[in-house]
Amino acid sequence: MSILFIEDEPKVATSLQKGLEENGFEVDLAPDGAVGRHMASQKAYDLILLDINLPFVNGYEVCRSIRSTNTEVPIIMVTARGTVDEKISGFDAGADDYMVKPFDFRELLARIRVFLKRGGGGKEMNEGLILRVADLELNTASQTASRQGMPIVLTAKEYALLEFLVRSNGRVVTRAEITE
């Protein structure tokens, strides 16, 4: 599952990116609204996390721009702005959800999972896609692996790497691709 996180505060961005990646998500960071808008138009993300206070183009404008071409991708605004009027402006711009900083990371994860289950990314999760190579099986819904029916205990990163290799379908992948 790929997430675009548009956030101009480097500490916040890298901290959340690390947490999301540890939970099996692929996260691309955009440091400002203009870059974020461009990235959203170039790749089909499963979900977008969007700050409002951004350089060059604010989060409301980025949200409107994304919504003009993509009505399906879930957008969660994560911002320090928490007045009712600001929340309403976020929803009017096209956001699906709104979280005020600071927030509990577990709550963000729960909200992300809800949207991914409902949206296009959730189809795979709801159906419980099983990837197989010989006697190795990966369940993408539960993010578990087994070999000959015996479960394999993996960290989130180990599972993500194994799934990436299985989806590469026997193709040799470079170190840069694995790192990315």
Image (cartoon, grey):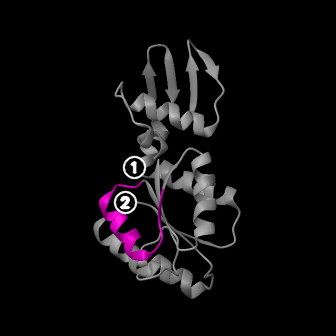
136 horizontally vs 177: left or right: right
Q: Residues within 10 Å of mark 2 (few under 14, many from 20)?
A: few
Write the residue at 63% across / 79% down.
80
Cα–Cα span, label 2 and label 1 = 8 Å
> For mark 1, what is the residue?
120
Point out the residue furthest to the front here.
175
What residue lies at 63% left-to-right and 67% top-to-bottom? 11
Q: Quadrant of residue 73?
A: bottom left
Task: Reply above or below: 127 against 153.
Answer: below
Say which of 92 and 46 sits in front: 46
Q: Secondary structure at mark 2?
A: loop
Say if 166 sits above or below 6 in the image.
above
Mark on residue 128?
none
Q: What residue type is disc 1 on?
A: Gly
Q: Which residue is mark 2?
A: 72
State whether residue 105 appears in this view: yes
The answer to whether residue 142 is seen in the rendering is: no
Residue 177 falls left or right of residue 69:
right
132 up-or-down from 96: above or below:
above
Measured as percent of width and height from the top left, residue 148 is found at 56, 12
Figure check: 55 above or below 75: below
Where is residue 57? Give x, y as percent: 41, 81
| In-image side of 145 versus 91 (left or right) | right
Q: Residue at 46% across / 39% down in the picture?
A: 178
Residues at discs 2 and 1 in contact (Cβ within 8 Å): yes
**In the figure, residue 14 lies in which quadrant?**
bottom right
The magenta-colored residue range is 28-45
Q: Percent x, y for residue 127?
A: 45, 35
The amino acid beneath tag 2 is: Glu
Tell me if mark 1 has few (under 14), some (14-19) or many (20+) residues whose alpha carbon lies within 10 angstroms of its own. Answer: some
Residue that appears at 48% across and 44% down: 179
Residue 98 in magenta stretch: no
